[in-house]
Every structure is written in structure tokens, then in C-alpha cells.
Amino acid sequence: MLEALGFLLLFALALRMGTRLPPAALGVWLNLLWFVYQNELGSGWLTYLKGLGAGLFLATGYGHPSLAWALTPWPLLLYLRFDLKEFLLYLPAMGEGMLLGALFYLAGFRKR
């Protein structure tokens, strides 16, 4: 769960840089970097989906729908060659990440 917080730090940095790039482009690169990091150096797909779920929830909370669409797990689906049967096994991890994002959202890490 602590590695999923790393994505939230990247997400906060991305929101700070949001004035330089459109949110959709920023989300695509953020998603791809997080996927490559988790596959090469991190814990794997479960942590990738937990971090992505938290970022997805916070993107919708901040009112950036294009960033939320960019944070869908498209790199994992491409890696799995769109084998949805295998992807569905990992989907509960994304739900855990969304719960983590909801906790951060309710704790006050949002716009007012």
C-alpha cells in the first residue's frame, strides 16, 4: 500500500505541472511511467493498479475528466494483448486504490 502512495506523489507533481501541458497528455505520460516503473523496479501489476485507482479517483475529484480518462489501465491491457479474462483477476486491486484515493479526498487533499 505504501508504494501506491508514490503514485500520489507523482500525481501531485503532475497537477503542479498541469499549466505547462494539457491534463490528458500529462496523464498518458504519468500512466506510462508508472507502468514501466512497476514492471521493471516495483512490485508489479497490483501496485500499479492500486496507484492508478487512487489517481483516477483524485482526478475526478479535482474535476479533470481528461486526466481521469488518461489514467485508465491501457498499458496493462496492451501488455496483456486485451485478454480481459486475465485482466479481471487484477481489477480488485484498482478498487483498493480507489478507496485509498477516496480516503485522501475526504481527508482534505482536494480543491476547495
Image (cartoon, rainbow, N blue to C red):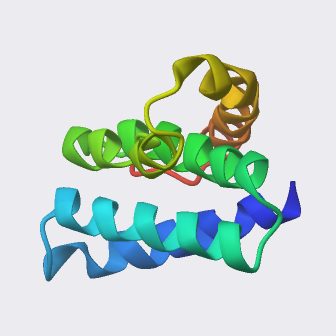
In the image, 84 versus 33, the foreground residue is 84
In the image, 100 versus 87, the foreground residue is 87
Q: Left or right: where does residue 59 sit relative to residue 2?
A: left
In the picture shown, does residue 51 fall above or below 91? Answer: below
Residue 49 horizontal/vertical position (percent): 65, 45
In the image, 76 versus 46, the foreground residue is 76
In the image, 59 versus 71, the foreground residue is 71
In the picture shown, does residue 109 fall above or below 65? Answer: below
Q: Residue at x 56, y 72 (%)?
A: 36
Displayed quadrant of residue 88: top right
Q: Which quarter shows the N terminus?
A: bottom right
Residue 64 horizontal/vertical position (percent): 25, 45
Q: Left or right: where does residue 53 sit relative to residue 23?
A: right
Tally of numbered discs: 0
Q: Residue at x 28, y 39 (%)?
A: 69
Residue 100 horizontal/vertical position (percent): 73, 41
Q: Residue at x 69, y 77 (%)?
A: 40
Residue 106 horizontal/vertical position (percent): 64, 37
Q: Left or right: where does residue 97 sit relative to residue 60?
A: right
Displayed quadrant of residue 2: bottom right
Q: Residue at x 47, y 42 (%)?
A: 73
In the picture shown, does residue 39 fall above or below 112? Answer: below
